Image (cartoon, rainbow, N blue to C red):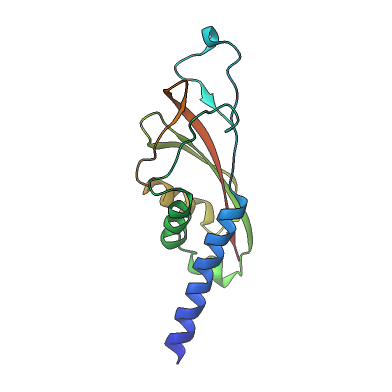
Amino acid sequence: MAAKLVLLRKSKEVIFILIFCVFCTQSWAQGVHNKAEFKEKDIYSTFDEVQEKPEFPGGQTAFYKFIGTTFKVSAEAKKNKVKGKAFVQFIIEKDGSLSSFKVVKDLGFGVGDEAIRVLKLSPKWIAGAVGGKAVRVKYDLPITIN
């Protein structure tokens, strides 16, 4: 009976993380005003100007499932009943790899480090594009711990 309760509780945590991610993910993009000004290393910081948005293999739902099943809340965070939202920022590169990980808001107890660990395990994404050319895109990911 105790094993069933633990499994049910763990399932609820994963489902909550997935649902939260679906409704809270935000991304930003910075537009290029003049094509002559475009530089190879420019980063689009919002999705507004990105014509073809970067996409996780399998889509947004697959991304949230990946985060929900891979992210592990530390024993210390559980012991201290850590709750709230952490924000992690990263770049989706032209080749679909992820880089430049930055914890914008951390809840402590290893939450930010765990988020970066999980993102480093991510498969390559389908890169964003402007005018048919792959571009770098900044992505902000909120992670809620409940």
What residue is rendered at 52% in x and 28% in y? 51
Along the horizontal axis of the image, is 9 left or right of 70? right
Q: Quadrant of residue 28?
A: top right
Count of labels in the image: 0
Q: Position of residue 66 (x, y in %)?
A: 42, 56
Q: Quadrant of the C terminus?
A: bottom right
* Residue at x 38%, y 35% (from the top left corner): 96
Question: Which quadrant would residue 80 be assigned to in this image?
Answer: bottom right
Q: Residue at x 54, y 27 (%)?
A: 44
Q: Could you tell me residue 15's position as x and y percent?
A: 52, 67
Question: What is the x, y in percent for residue 119?
Answer: 43, 47
- Work out which quarter of the rendered image holds the N terminus and state it: bottom left
Q: Position of residue 70 (x, y in %)?
A: 41, 59
Q: Nearer the viewer, residue 129 or 87?
A: 129
Pick the residue in front: 74 or 96.
96
Location of residue 63 with respect to 83 vertically, above or below? above
Specify the farthest residue to the top: 36
- Which residue is most to the bottom? 1
- Above or below for 87 versus 33: below
